[in-house]
């Protein structure tokens, strides 16, 4: 399969959070698509953090796009020049006050490869230790809690844990947990 060719790209919006471009693309069959909108954002991290008792650390925060409080895994944006593992460690500490002694990379996935350019880096963290207070950004109001795996699965079924990318990260973390247990 041949890739599309970008004939031109025009920046429509650009700020510290994202860049939106309108591209003119040519498909391998010669067809031109104009405009094709692409959202350029920084990469993100998600942290599947498991306590010694097996429960998973979750966060709740208001998400303006859907205007609802959402239950998620800890995570956030990777700062420019920051290594993904360092971003994961920073986000876990900032959002929950916890650090972890053991970190395992679980891989990456795309947020929405049809329209977005960013990647999500997923990490499994264990050996959790509460180091202090949350260190939230001015726009953040986050509550955290430890939930049992079956409780999270039930919340997925009832749409209380309903952010698709966090659900995917949860199940990748659960899969890694199963693999680690079977070693």
Image (cartoon, rainbow, N blue to C red):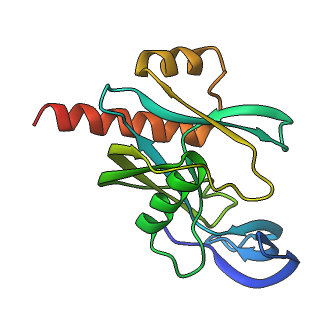
Position of residue 66 measured from the top left corner of the image (x, y, whole percent): 83, 37
In the picture provided, is 20 more to the left or to the right than 130?
right
- Give me the residue at 60% from left, 65% from top: 118
Which residue: 45% across, 73% down?
Answer: 83
Q: Position of residue 117 (x, y in %)?
A: 63, 67
Tag count in the figure? 0
Q: Residue 181: image x %, image y %?
A: 17, 32
Measured as percent of width and height from the top left, residue 47 is found at 46, 48
> Is residue 84 toward the left or the right of residue 157 in the image?
left
Q: In the rendered image, which quarter is residue 8 located in?
A: bottom right
Q: Nearer the viewer, residue 176 or 131?
A: 131
Q: Please identify the quarter of the rendering in which residue 40 is found.
A: bottom right
Q: Is residue 27 above or below residue 182?
A: below
Image quarter of residue 28: bottom right
Q: Which quarter of the rendered picture does the C terminus lie within?
A: top left
Residue name at image x 70 percent, y 33 percent:
70
Instruction: State the residue at coordinates (81%, 74%).
Output: 21
Q: Residue furthest right?
A: 12
Q: Is residue 141 left or right of residue 102?
A: right
Front residue of 97/151: it is 97
Looking at this view, is 58 or 130 the one in front? 130
Is 63 left or right of 181, judged from the image as shown?
Answer: right
Name the residue at the bottom extreme. Answer: 8
């Amino acid at each position: 399969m041949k890739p599309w060719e970008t004939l031109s790209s025009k920046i429509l919006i650009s700020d510290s959070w994202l860049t939106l471009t309108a591209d003119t693309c040519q498909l391998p069959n010669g067809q031109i698509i104009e405009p094709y909108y692409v959202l350029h954002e920084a990469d993100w991290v998600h942290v599947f953090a498991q306590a010694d008792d097996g429960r998973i650390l979750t966060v709740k925060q208001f998400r303006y796009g859907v205007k609802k409080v959402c239950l998620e895994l800890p995570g956030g944006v990777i700062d420019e020049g920051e290594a993904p593992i360092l971003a994961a460690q920073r986000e876990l500490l900032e959002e929950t006050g916890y650090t972890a002694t053991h970190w395992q990379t679980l891989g990456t996935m795309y947020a929405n490869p049809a329209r977005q350019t960013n990647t999500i880096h997923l990490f499994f963290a264990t050996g959790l230790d509460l180091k202090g207070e949350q260190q939230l950004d001015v726009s953040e109001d986050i509550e955290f809690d430890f939930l049992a795996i079956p409780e999270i699965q039930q919340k997925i079924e009832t749409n209380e844990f309903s952010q698709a990318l966090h659900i995917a990260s949860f199940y990748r973390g659960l899969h890694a947990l199963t693999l680690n247990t079977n070693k």
